[in-house]
Amino acid sequence: MEPYNTHSTPSTQLRLVYDGGLAVQVLDRTEDEVHQNPRTLPLWTFRCAQWQKRGRLGYQEVWRRLKRAPLSAGAQEAWVDRCLYHGFSYSNAFKSAPPELAQLAGGLR
């Protein structure tokens, strides 16, 4: 996939269609940490949902990765679903700013 839209006319600007930066690093780190320790799923869900709500992470991608990681580590699907629904709903009610993506790319501390 090319990172920029190449179907532009001279009167249109280049538009980034794929960002392989911090957002992807955060999702990669999230998936790795949740797979290693499924008990971190509620917090990772909440943090990623905050950034999804702000438009930096895609909803489908966040949900898919957060569901796949603990299931592949042996977690029960009912528990995973509850964590995901709770984390996304709680992030909608939470008004404070999330940690910076650069911090999340380094893992939870």
Image (cartoon, rainbow, N blue to C red):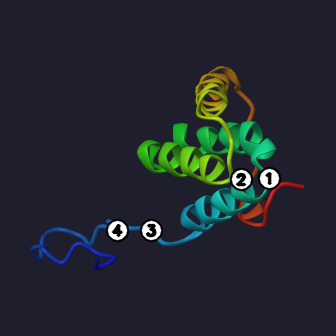
Characterize the local packing of mark 1: few (<14), some (14-19) or many (20 or more) Cα atoms within 10 angstroms.
some
Q: How far apart are the two marked residues, 2 and 1, measured between alpha carbons?
A: 5 Å
Quarter placement of the C terminus: bottom right
Taking the spot 68% from the left edge, 42% from the top edge, the residue there is 75
In depth, the one of 3 and 48 nearer the eye is: 48
Residue 43 lies, in percent from the top left, at 76, 40
Looking at the rendered image, the disc whose residue lies closer to the viewer, 1 or 4, is: 1
Indicate the amino acid at tag 4: Leu
Q: Could you say whether the residue bearing mark 1 is in a helix, strand or loop?
A: loop
Residue 72 lies, in percent from the top left, at 61, 53
Q: Could you say whether the residue bearing mark 2 is in a helix, strand or loop?
A: helix
Residue 86 lies, in percent from the top left, at 65, 24
Q: Do the CB atoms of the residues marked 4 and 3 lie less than 8 Å apart?
A: yes
Looking at the rendered image, the disc whose residue lies closer to the viewer, 2 or 3, is: 2
Q: N-terminal of the two: label 4 or label 2? A: 4
Please say if 87 is above or below 35.
above
Residue hosting label 2? 34
Residue hosting label 4? 16
